[in-house]
Amino acid sequence: MKFKNLLLATTAAAAIAPLTSFAQCDQYTSSLADHVDNDRAIAETSFFSTVYKAKGTSQILGYFGSSTATVHTTDQANFYIGECPEVQNSAPEIIEYNYTKKVNGNDGLWVVGQATDIDGNLSHVSVGNPAIGYDCEGDFKNSGEYEFMCLADVSNLAKEVQHEWVLVAFDTEGEMSVREPINFTIIDFSIDHAPEIVSYEYESTITDGILVVTGQADDVDYNLNKVIVGNPATPGYECELNASYKTFECSVDVSFLDKNVEHTWAVAALDTEGAISELKEVKFTVVEEQANACVRATNQTHVDSGNAIKMGSSYFAKGSYQYLGNVDVVLTTLEETQPGYWVASDCNAPQ
């Protein structure tokens, strides 16, 4: 199967039966009496008058059996006045898809995803370029979406160059979806490749003095060695790497850095040959930690300040309800460990 003008040809594609199809519309033109005889209309007689109505919808067709009318139906149970409406076919749509951008030529190019067609007449999905194309296998789900999987033989294509293919869905009326790009490179294992930081995430505002960076790294040569994070001008800090799952976690104490200014670090992966990935920026700000509020005062003053409550003659720390005694002039020290939560403490209260 070949492309024509960058479009996948439909003639050689094996059509797949859609979940639903366009409803067949049939129309009939005859006398009202003939419509009644052929179960397309009913005649209702009252006194000396007869009215002819379309079957199912009861639309009035007329009052004389010899009159002519046109009716149409899609189910032979409900008839409507007039000719069949013109059907506007909509193009199918690729909802989502995934594929491997760096391909082992012996394994082939795999593409998986979902497609749909609001008309219910999706035919097939294909992947390829102007010279060669492949139809995908798939099934319709109860939701009406079509899940597909494509396997293309790319063993004869050039290595270490980007190949630009497209993914297209077709319907039974010849309409096609927007062409989705499939750009991939076939790996040449005779040369060493730099590893890659596939994904990573971190909190840009550090409140506890610890920078945590997590993510996924990979190396097409299967020789991923380590992941490091740090100021690019320094050796950096080695992260904990799970080589089996290609995931990493970096936890670095950055409490010594200047506070309330943005720091620009980077995360990178290295392989056993010393090749390093592209540096990925890690920008963060270390925020000065705020000490908990610490107050030393009499029990009654704590109540007046909203740090304690009085129940009867007894005093309790607000939030924790720690008992402070029943003497209003006794000095106690309270610490607010979280908003609105005070506890008796030996913290250093300002004088």
Image (cartoon, grey):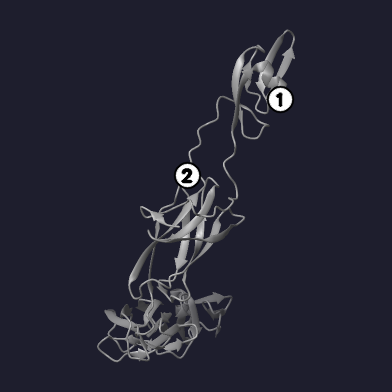
Q: Position of residue 177 (x, y in %)?
A: 44, 52
Q: Position of residue 18 (x, y in %)?
A: 58, 50
Task: In the rendered view, tell whether residue 177 sits above or below residue 42.
Answer: below
In this view of the protein, can residue 24 be seen by the observer?
yes
Residue at screen point 51% across, 49% down: 117
Nearer the observer, 337 or 267: 267
Instruction: Please state, as top left, top right, bottom left or bottom right, where the C terminus lies in the image.
Output: bottom left
Instruction: Please state, as top left, top right, bottom left or bottom right, where the N terminus lies in the image.
Output: bottom left
Total numbered badges shown on the rendered structure:
2
Cα distance, mark 1 to mark 2? 34 Å
Nearer the observer, 30 or 79: 30
Q: Which mark is residue 39?
A: 1
Helix or strand or loop: what does disc 2 sit on?
A: loop
Residue at screen point 38% across, 78% down: 187
Quarter occupied by residue 66: top right
Task: In the rendered view, tell whether residue 57 sits above or below residue 303.
Answer: above
Q: Position of residue 167 (x, y in %)?
A: 43, 59
Can you identify the residue that label 2 sits on?
90
Nearer the observer, 49 or 104: 104
Q: Position of residue 240 (x, y in %)?
A: 44, 89
Residue at screen point 44% across, 56% down: 168
Q: Which mark is residue 263?
A: none
Which residue type does callout 1 highlight?
Answer: Asp
Task: In the rendered view, tell whether residue 345 sits above or below residue 130.
Answer: below
Nearer the observer, 205 or 133: 133
Which residue type does callout 2 highlight?
Answer: Ser
Quarter occupied by residue 99: bottom left
Q: Is residue 184 left or right of residue 343?
A: left
Helix or strand or loop: what does disc 1 sit on?
A: loop
